[in-house]
Image (tube, grey):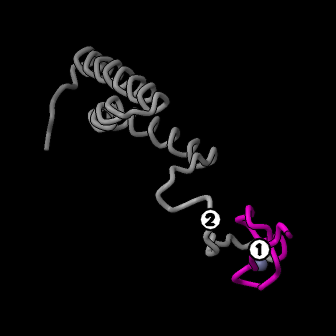
């Protein structure tokens, strides 16, 4: 059985079932051919997506500590140990950041919320 099970939807050149980027035209091709062992409900631990999620979480933690705390709080109740750890990390770093921000604002005397 060949590894090639589908074609690029742009240039119709054959491509591997595990490839998401066409080698011929360089287009990103959605996995139209459903793989039997993988349903859309299965959690796919894509390392690229995971890294992006981490970056996103760091940004959220820095700019919106309360939101990060909320997300972290939800993740704390997740069954997955990895997510639980991430949740702990999120809540802790968000708390620390919030305290740091409060001290900076009080220290510089700029704690004037103007809406
Ligand atoms: Zn192509």
Disc 2 or 1, which lies upstream in sequence? 1
Which SS class for mark 2?
loop
Question: Can you tell me whether the CB of the residue at mark 2 lies under 8 Å from the nearest atom of ligand 1?
Answer: no
Which SS class for mark 1?
strand
Q: Is residue 10 magenta?
A: yes
Q: Residue at x 83, y 66 (%)?
A: 3
User: How many numbered marks are there?
Assistant: 2
Residue closer to the observer: 114 or 35: 35
Magenta part, dominant SS: loop
Q: Residue 37's x, y, as percent?
A: 62, 59
What quarter of the picture does the C terminus occupy?
top left
Dot 1 crowding, Cα within 10 Å, few <14, some 14–19, many 20+: few
Q: Residue 52's x, y, as percent?
A: 55, 46
Q: Which mark is on residue 14?
A: none
Ligand 1 positioned in quadrant: bottom right
Q: Residue at x 56, y 43 (%)?
A: 50
How far is mark 2 from mark 1, CA to CA?
A: 12 Å
Residue at mark 1: 5
Residue closer to the observer: 5 or 46: 5
Q: Residue 31's x, y, as percent?
A: 63, 70
| Residue 103 placement, left or right of 39 | left
Q: Residue 8's x, y, as percent?
A: 74, 79
Q: Which mark is on residue 36?
A: 2
Q: Residue at x 27, y 15 (%)?
A: 103
Q: Residue at x 14, y 39 (%)?
A: 114
Q: Is residue 66 magenta?
A: no
Start and end of the magenta stretch?
1-24
């Amino acid at each position: 059985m060949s590894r090639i099970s589908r074609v690029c939807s742009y240039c119709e050149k054959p491509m591997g079932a595990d490839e998401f980027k066409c080698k011929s035209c360089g287009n990103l091709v959605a996995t139209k051919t459903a793989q039997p062992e993988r349903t859309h409900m299965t959690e796919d631990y894509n390392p690229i997506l995971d890294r992006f999620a981490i970056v996103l979480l760091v940004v959220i933690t820095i700019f919106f500590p309360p939101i990060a705390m909320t997300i972290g709080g939800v993740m704390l109740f997740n069954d997955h140990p990895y997510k639980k750890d991430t949740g702990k990390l999120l809540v802790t770093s968000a708390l620390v950041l919030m305290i740091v921000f409060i001290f900076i604002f009080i220290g510089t005397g700029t704690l004037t919320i103007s809406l």
